[in-house]
């Protein structure tokens, strides 16, 4: 399969074949690695440059051997969570969901090439300002509602919504990350999910009570906790003792600081309903008065990214650069293999959306 391509492709093809010299040799020829920008339990995130386009990306790196050792769950549980996250992100393409560009796997590592979000976490953004004014909180919350409505429409629940999982891109737009706990049980989301997960302070009462719950309803509760954190700068339910925290969540009682407007109090109350059946739904949220203030249109959750077909300008640029026919390039792109070509195509689409001509760097 290597005799049909040009030199640059040959480079790419051979780059696909991981050598065992350095831990990141699977990325050679495709990405230039830079500094580490994050490290969590079993994942490390490094800044990188996609060589063919020169665009910045974030590469989340996981060591398969470590999965399971760092968490209380058994190994076989953590590995599928990574594959669940990858499969979910492959289905999601939205302006407020962090875009997956490419997946590389060796016998010991999994690499996820993700959208670059240099603004860091919404969590730090709030902490630096103590709390946000209503207008600014509303701008962010409309983006969060757009993202959550979209993933619910796609049959997913995030189940770990919190300011740490919302990153800011270079245009101060929010991007939802970490679908490691998302749920898309077969047959859509309406199954009751029995697993308890996510971060306790943002977890819904039915979830901390170990009851069966709907992912979509639990996400709405977490959005209520998120909105409270944006407007107040602290959490509605907090206690260093886990049992005490659970009891506060199950009570549904929280303080409302005097600076909260009546409309924001009303919206918080609609989301922080202990009984999930009394909780507001995302479709009611998108036209809620507090979210509409100062905005003419209700929140539009549709993706701005083309869902069908491919962009001919990008296909042409790739074909010319690689000395291949547009038909051949179009067919290869439409395989959506989340390989280097998928990353190249999606990054060129991002260049186009940013008003720059989609370009491949010469001689690569
Ligand atoms: O791009 C990301 N983070 C990032 C990138 C650049 C910088 C930062 C974070 C924070 N310090 C300034 C520079 C990022 C993107 C996706 C992800 F899952 C995790 C992290």
Image: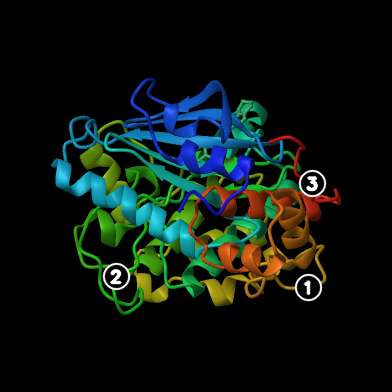
Ligand 1: does it lie within 8 Å of the C-beta at label 3? no
| Rendered location of residue 172, percent (x, y) | 72, 42
The span from disc 2 to disc 3 (Cα, nearest Å) is 40 Å
Looking at the image, do the residues carrying marks 2 and 3 touch, with CB atoms under 8 Å apart?
Answer: no
Q: Which residue is mark 3?
A: 359
Image vertical order of residue 75 relative to residue 353, above or below:
above
Image vertical order of residue 27 relative to residue 218, above or below:
above
- Rate crowding at label 2 as few (under 14), some (14 to 19) or many (20 or more) other CA atoms within 10 Å: some
Which circle, 1 or 3, is nearer the viewer? Answer: 3
Q: Quadrant of residue 150?
A: bottom right
Which circle, 1 or 2, is nearer the viewer? Answer: 2
Q: Nearer the viewer, residue 224 or 304?
A: 304
Which sits earlier in the primary sequence, circle 1 or circle 2?
A: 2
Q: Nearer the viewer, residue 249 or 173?
A: 173
View quadrant of ligand 1: top right
Work out whether residue 62 can be spotted: yes
Label 1: element kind: loop
Count of all numbered marks drawn on residues in the image: 3
Q: In the picture, which quadrant includes the C terminus?
A: top right
Q: Which residue is mark 1?
A: 297
- Rate crowding at label 1 as few (under 14), some (14 to 19) or many (20 or more) other CA atoms within 10 Å: few
Q: Which residue is mark 2?
A: 185
Label 3: element kind: loop
| Rendered location of residue 34, percent (x, y) | 58, 22
The colour scheme is: rainbow
Q: Nearer the viewer, residue 218 or 167?
A: 167
The span from disc 1 to disc 3 (Cα, nearest Å) is 35 Å
**In this image, 312 relative to 9: left or right?**
right
Which sits earlier in the primary sequence, circle 1 or circle 3?
A: 1
| Rendered location of residue 178, percent (x, y) | 44, 47
- Rate crowding at label 3 as few (under 14), some (14 to 19) or many (20 or more) other CA atoms within 10 Å: some
């Amino acid at each position: 399969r290597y005799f049909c391509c040009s030199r640059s492709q040959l480079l790419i093809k051979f780059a696909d074949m991981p050598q065992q010299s350095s831990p990141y040799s699977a990325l050679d020829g495709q990405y230039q690695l830079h500094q580490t920008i994050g490290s969590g339990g079993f994942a490390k995130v490094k800044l990188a440059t996609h060589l063919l386009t020169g665009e910045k990306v974030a590469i989340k790196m996981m060591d398969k051997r470590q999965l399971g050792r760092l968490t209380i769950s058994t190994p076989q549980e953590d590995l599928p969570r990574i594959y669940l996250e990858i499969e979910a992100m492959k289905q999601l393409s939205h302006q407020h969901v962090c875009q997956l560009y490419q997946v590389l796997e060796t016998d010991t590592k999994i690499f996820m090439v993700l959208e670059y979000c240099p603004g860091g976490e919404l969590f730090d953004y709030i902490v630096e300002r103590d709390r946000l004014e209503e207008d600014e909180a509303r701008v962010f919350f409309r983006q969060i509602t757009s993202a959550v409505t979209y993933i619910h429409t796609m049959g997913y629940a995030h189940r770990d919504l919190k300011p740490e999982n919302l990153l800011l891109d270079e245009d101060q737009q929010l991007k939802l990350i970490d679908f490691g706990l998302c749920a898309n049980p077969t047959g859509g989301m309406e199954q009751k999910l029995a697993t308890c997960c996510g971060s306790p302070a943002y977890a819904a009462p039915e979830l901390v009570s170990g009851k069966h719950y709907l992912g979509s309803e639990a996400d709405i509760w977490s959005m209520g906790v998120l909105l409270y954190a944006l407007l107040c700068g602290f959490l509605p339910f907090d206690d260093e003792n886990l049992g005490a925290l659970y009891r506060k969540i199950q009570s549904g009682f929280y303080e409302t600081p005097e600076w909260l407007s009546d409309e924001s109090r009303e919206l918080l109350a609609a989301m922080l309903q202990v009984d999930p059946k009394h909780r507001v739904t995302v479709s009611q949220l998108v036209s809620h008065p507090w979210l509409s203030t100062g905005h003419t249109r209700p929140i539009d959750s549709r993706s701005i990214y083309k869902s069908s077909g491919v962009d001919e300008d990008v296909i042409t640029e790739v074909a010319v650069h690689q000395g291949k026919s547009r038909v051949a390039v179009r067919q290869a792109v439409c395989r959506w293999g989340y390989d280097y070509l998928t990353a190249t195509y999606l990054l060129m689409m991002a260049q186009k959306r940013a008003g720059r001509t989609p370009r491949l760097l010469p001689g690569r």
